[in-house]
Image: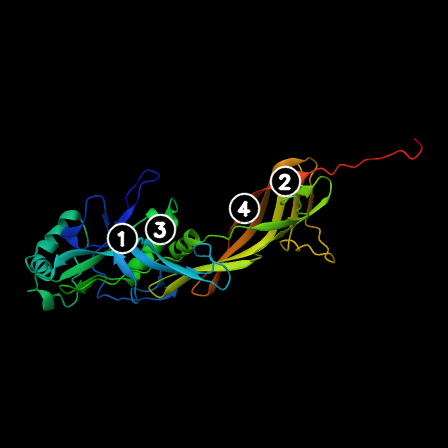
Amino acid sequence: MLNTPRGRAVARRLGTGAALAIGLTMLGGVLGSATAGGGCDGVTGCGGGGGSVEQTGHTVTVQVSGTFVGGGSAGSPGSTTVSVPTPCWYTESFSGKEYADWIDSGKAAQDAHHHGDAPTEIYPGYEQHKNDADGHWYGGECISTSFGDDMDAFFKYSDAWFKDHGTVWVPAGGQPPTPPVPPTVLRDAALQAMKLPEPTFDWNPKANGGSSVVNLDTWFWLDDNIDNGNVTASAGGNTATVTADRQSVSFSAPTAGAVDCADGGTPWSPDAKSDCVLYYREASDGTPTTAAAHWGLSWTFNGAPQGALDPIDAQQTEDVGVFEVQTINRDPNS
């Protein structure tokens, strides 16, 4: 394989001889006849294309839907499409005639000898296309961009992909199989489309146009008390779903400290009780008060749990006026 500087993509190519591009490494010869599918697992997904998946270049169009797409709310799912990179794909190589000429002329054997490679394994049934100058053979190619610096994961994925996706024959006007999208790429597409709802909130007392009072319990609670939602990204029969569950909400202000509220607070009423309160110590025309909703994330691939993801906060800040109640104390003995 290529030794590349950190940050530079590593590419692998499964051979179709002369079609190899500069800088790519050939990994042997033929893998045999094509299979559009393969087993479903956490490395390669569930086989090749199908459905409405559209591949353009090295990206695949993915359908994304769920209650938290575009800031959706519970019971009101949204949907969109996004383009995501796929680390492995099929690249056009020899036409049927070019390949047959390369094999039958003995040049394939000469090239293998010149490069010190094992004898070329011949595509089964290549004679059927020996006079076809319009259809082409397609070989596999993978690039590590989607895996960052995790080369072990990249090689594991590409090895499994090459094992299950052999060289394919595609007639003129046809399309090669759409490669599967890795579970983590689908997961990241769902994460990128996820927009957590802003924690809009209310408070009491709310006098004089919305102001609280110095040194008085000020209740806080969420207006739209949504506590869970999800986003699902689907492509080629595979799905990754990211689920968000609100763990708690905290309210804070510079002159009032902070309070954690597991349930998002209780709306004020004369008979209600709540510990979700702040005490403003100074009067002001508007004290910036922030609600921060703390969300825990987890994900599944084709329904199988994959574990927790890093938590995310969603915040909203409003100016809360605080006024001071004036009192007159009269000494009864004066």
The residue positioned 23% from the left and 47% from the top of the image is 24
Give the mark toward the camera: 2 or 1: 2
Please provide percent x and percent y for residue 224: 56, 56
Please provide percent x and percent y for residue 242: 47, 58
Label whose residue precedes the other's in the sequence (2 or 4): 4
C-alpha span from label 2 to label 1:
54 Å
Residue sitting nearer the eye, 63 or 27: 63
Q: Quadrant of the C terminus?
A: top right
**Which numbered marker is on residue 58?**
1
Residue type at numbered disc 1: His
Neighbours of disc 2 within 10 Å: few (<14), some (14-19), many (20+): many
Label whose residue precedes the other's in the sequence (3 or 4): 3
Residue type at numbered disc 3: Phe
Label whose residue precedes the other's in the sequence (3 or 1): 1
Q: Are marks 2 and 3 in contact (CB under 8 Å)?
A: no
The residue positioned 16% from the left and 60% from the top of the image is 137
According to the picture, the residue beneath numbered tag 2 turns out to be 321
- Does dot 2 land on a helix, a strand or a loop? strand
According to the picture, the residue beneath numbered tag 4 turns out to be 315
The residue positioned 38% from the left and 65% from the top of the image is 40
Residue type at numbered disc 2: Gly
Give the mark toward the camera: 2 or 3: 2
- Does dot 3 land on a helix, a strand or a loop? helix
